[in-house]
Amino acid sequence: QVQLVESGGGLVQAGGSLRLSCAASGRTLSNYFMGWFRQAPGKERAFVASIRWSAGTTYYADSVKDQFTISRDDAKNTVYLQMNSLKPEDTAVYYCAARTVVSLSYSYWGQGTQVTVSS
């Protein structure tokens, strides 16, 4: 089992920045992908970014490429999502998730953290 706890959400004006954190516990993450997803009101949950823990390889949705950066701190077992130049359309609940490198889907999810961008 992997437990995930997100933090760092909040209210920010358009053009501002936020950094989300996701602290993981329960397993060594060397064989995991860590991902960030978001769900806006009335929309389905969508992939934002992911990182393969061991190699640090990153992947991004086209909509956030060059705007968001995913990273990890191995010593803290924490993954981050740095979000810059935020827009009102980035408003959503952001979820952290984990899956093993051989899994096709994410098995572990955090509780989510609200990000609201005002215009």
Image (tube, helix red, strand yellow):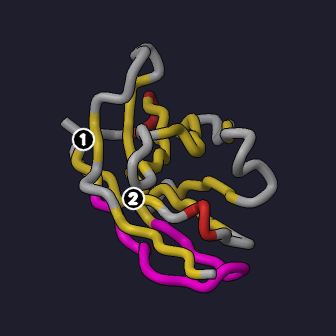
Which residue corresponds to the image point at 50% horizontal and 39% vertical from the top-left? 46
| Residue stretch in magenta | 5-20
Which residue corresponds to the image point at 49% horizontal and 47% vertical from the top-left? 36
Q: Secondary structure at mark 1?
A: loop
> Where does residue 16 sit, x and y in percent of width and height?
67, 82
| Residue type (three-letter) at the residue carrying disc 1 | Val
- From the viewer's side, name the closer residue of 84 and 28: 84
- Of badges 1 and 2, nearer the viewer stands 2
- From the viewer's side, name the closer residue of 84 and 93: 93
> Where does residue 56 sit, x and y in percent of width and height?
64, 41
| Residue type (three-letter) at the residue carrying disc 2 | Val
**Quadrant into which the C terminus falls:** bottom right
Q: Is 62 placed above or below 16 here?
A: above
Whether residue 15 is in magenta: the answer is yes
Mark 1 is surrounded, within 10 Å at the Cα level, by few (under 14), some (14 to 19) or many (20 or more) other residues, namely some
* Magenta segment, prevailing SS (helix, strand or loop): strand
Left/right of residue 2 with respect to residue 116 in the rendered view = left
Left/right of residue 17 with respect to residue 74 in the rendered view = right
> Residue at label 1?
2
Which mark is on residue 93? 2
Q: Is 90 placed above or below 95 here?
A: below
Q: Earlier in the sequence, mark 1 or mark 2?
A: 1
